[in-house]
């Protein structure tokens, strides 16, 4: 298979098309089977086209990015495992539970984790209640 960049000499539209070989392109052109998608003209020619080169430098860069992503995902998963094992999950009642712990000094059990809106987190901060946000990856691996 070969891909050519083509140009319509009538309306200057450029487009790409695949052919099984360069010989097939020549046969189709000779029989006037190539036409413009825009103006339906048969005045189609090959256009200048940059060759596809294999770039090992970008492949290495991509591999490094994938490795970096996997390391970060592994670290986040380890944090999540630690949190699940050492903190109480309170779901969407996080803001309420955080205030209960902060204002009721007697209620000193293990830490909590859950979900809260940005507004809830801002209000907790304004009340002097320290919270932290961490990325949470939901997956079957966790």
Image (spheres, rainbow, N blue to C red):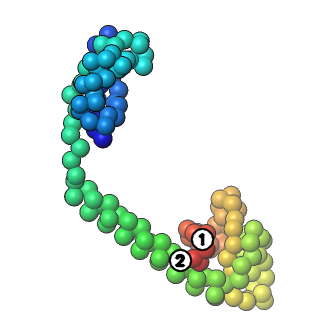
Residue at image x 77%, y 87%? 107
Rendering quarter of residue 25: top left
Circles 1 and 2: CB atoms closer than 8 Å: no
Q: Give the left or right position of residue 47, taking residue 65 as reference.
A: left
For mark 1, give the secondary structure: loop
Q: Which residue is mark 1?
A: 139
Q: Give the left or right position of residue 93, taking residue 3 as reference.
A: right
Q: Position of residue 41 (x, y in %)?
A: 37, 11
Q: Which residue is mark 2?
A: 77
Answer whether residue 130 is visible to the viewer in this image. Answer: yes
Q: Position of residue 11 (x, y in %)?
A: 34, 12
User: Which part of the image, by quadrant, shows the N terminus?
Assistant: top left
User: Which part of the image, by quadrant, shows the C terminus?
Assistant: bottom right
Answer whether residue 126 is visible to the viewer in this image. Answer: no
Rendering quarter of residue 14: top left
Foreground disc of the pair 1, 2: 1
For mark 2, give the secondary structure: helix
Pick whichever, 113 or 42, lies toward us: 42
Residue at image x 23%, y 31%? 23
Count of numbered circles in the view: 2
Q: Position of residue 56 (x, y in %)?
A: 22, 58
């Amino acid at each position: 298979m070969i891909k050519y960049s083509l140009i319509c000499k009538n309306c200057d539209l450029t487009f790409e098309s695949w052919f099984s070989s360069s010989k097939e392109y020549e046969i189709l052109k000779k029989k006037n089977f190539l036409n413009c998608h825009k103006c339906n003209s048969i005045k189609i020619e090959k256009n200048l086209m940059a060759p596809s080169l294999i770039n090992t430098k970008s492949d290495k860069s991509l591999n490094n990015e994938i490795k970096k992503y996997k390391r970060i995902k592994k670290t986040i998963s380890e944090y999540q495992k630690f949190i699940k094992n050492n903190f109480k999950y309170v779901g969407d009642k996080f803001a309420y539970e955080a205030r209960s712990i902060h204002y009721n000094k007697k209620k000193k059990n293990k830490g909590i984790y859950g979900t809260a809106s940005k507004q809830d987190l801002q209000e907790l901060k304004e009340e002097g209640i320290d919270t932290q946000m961490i990325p949470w990856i939901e997956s079957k691996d966790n």
